[in-house]
Image (spheres, rainbow, N blue to C red):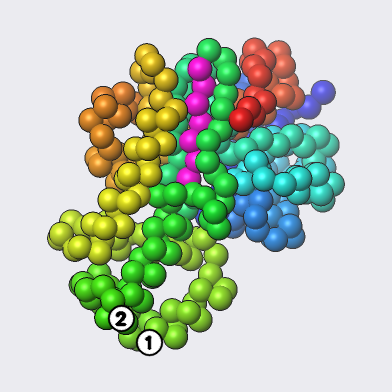
Amino acid sequence: MTDYVIAIDGGGTSCRAAVADRTGTVVGRGMRGAANIFSRADTITESIIAASASALENAGLDAGLLSHVPAFLGLAGLNVGTRQEQLAADLPFTDTRFVHDGIIALQGALGDGDGVIAILGTGSAYVVRFQGQTRIVGGWGFAVGDQASGAVIGRLLLQQALLAQDGIRPLTPLGRAVMARFDGNSENVVEFTLEAKPADYGSFAPMIFDFDGSGDPMAQRILAEAVHDITETLDAIVFDGCERLCLLGGLAEKYGMRLAARHRAILREPLGDPLSGAVQLALRAFIPVAVPAIDTAEQR
C-alpha cells in the first residue's frame, strides 16, 4: 500500500505535479514544460518525469521514489487517439491512470457538485456535470477545434495582419504592431508558422486584448468571433437550473467580462485549480479510504 501519490496537470503550456500523502496533504510541487498529448511522446514523458521528480525533491523525498508510487494524470488532448497506452509504458510509476485534463479541472473547480466549466487558455474545452453524469465538449485540438483559445485567436491575428499587409483589410495599430515583430516582412510570418506550436501562437493573444481596449477594429473583430463561439457553446451545454459556471485558464478573466448577461449571472469562483482536482482523484484512485470514490469516466 502506497504512502504517497503523484498528481499531474499536463497542459499545452506547462506540466505541473503534486505529491500528496495518505491524508491528502500536498507535500511537494514541481513544474516543467508542456505535456499535451499532441506533443512528441518523448517530450511528454520528459516533462511528466521531470515535474514529478521536482515535486518529490520539493517534498524532501528521493527522486528515486518515482518507481515506487502511483500517478494520476490529467492531460490535454487525451480525448483523441490512444497514445496514452504507449505513454503509460514509458513512465516509471507503479500504476498510471489517465483522464482528460477537463476532468481534473472540473473536480478542482466544482468538487462533487453539478455545473459547467469552460477552460480558456492555450487550448479550450468545456465540461458539464449534471446529476452525476459528466460530458466533455470541444477540446479537439488546435488544427480543427479549440475555438476562442489563445492559440486560435493568435493564429487569427497573424492571418488578419497578413491580409492587412496585402491591402485587403485596413492596417490597424494592432496589425502594425504584429508586423513590427516580424520586421514588416510577411515572409517572416510564414517562416514562423512552419515550426510554431499552439503556445507560440498563443503568445500573441495578449496583444489582442490590449489593443481591444483602445478600440482597435482588428482586435474587436477577432474577439467578437471568439466571444460568439463561447456564447454558442455555453448556450448548448448550460442546463436548466445550472447555478455554477466557472471559467478556467489564462484567458478566463479576460473573457468573463465579455460574456452574455445570462452567463455572467451564474459565474462563480472555482473552488480550486486543476492540480487540486488531480490530487483528489489520485487519492480516490489509489487510497480509497482517504476519499469516497466517484465515477471519473469521460462521457461524450
Task: Residue 185: give its label.
Answer: 1
Task: Residue 165: give its label.
Answer: 2
Q: Give the quadrant of the C terminus.
A: top right
Q: Does the magenta stretch include residue 262?
A: no
In the image, residue 101 sits, relative to residue 194, either above or below, namely above
**Does label 2 or label 1 sit earlier along the sequence?**
2
Callout 2 amino acid: Gln
Q: Is residue 125 magenta?
A: yes
At 66% from the left edge and 35% from the top edge, which residue is drawn? 99
Highlighted range, magenta: 124-130
At 38% from the left edge and 22% from the top edge, which residue is drawn? 244
The reply to whether discs 2 and 1 touch (Cβ–Cβ < 8 Å) is no
For numbered disc 1, what is the local secondary structure?
A: loop
Assign the magenta stretch its main secondary structure.
Answer: strand
Q: Please give left or right for residue 17 compared with residue 121 in the image.
A: right
For numbered disc 2, what is the local secondary structure?
A: helix
In the image, residue 249 sits, relative to residue 190, either above or below, namely above
At 48% from the left edge and 36% from the top edge, which residue is drawn? 126
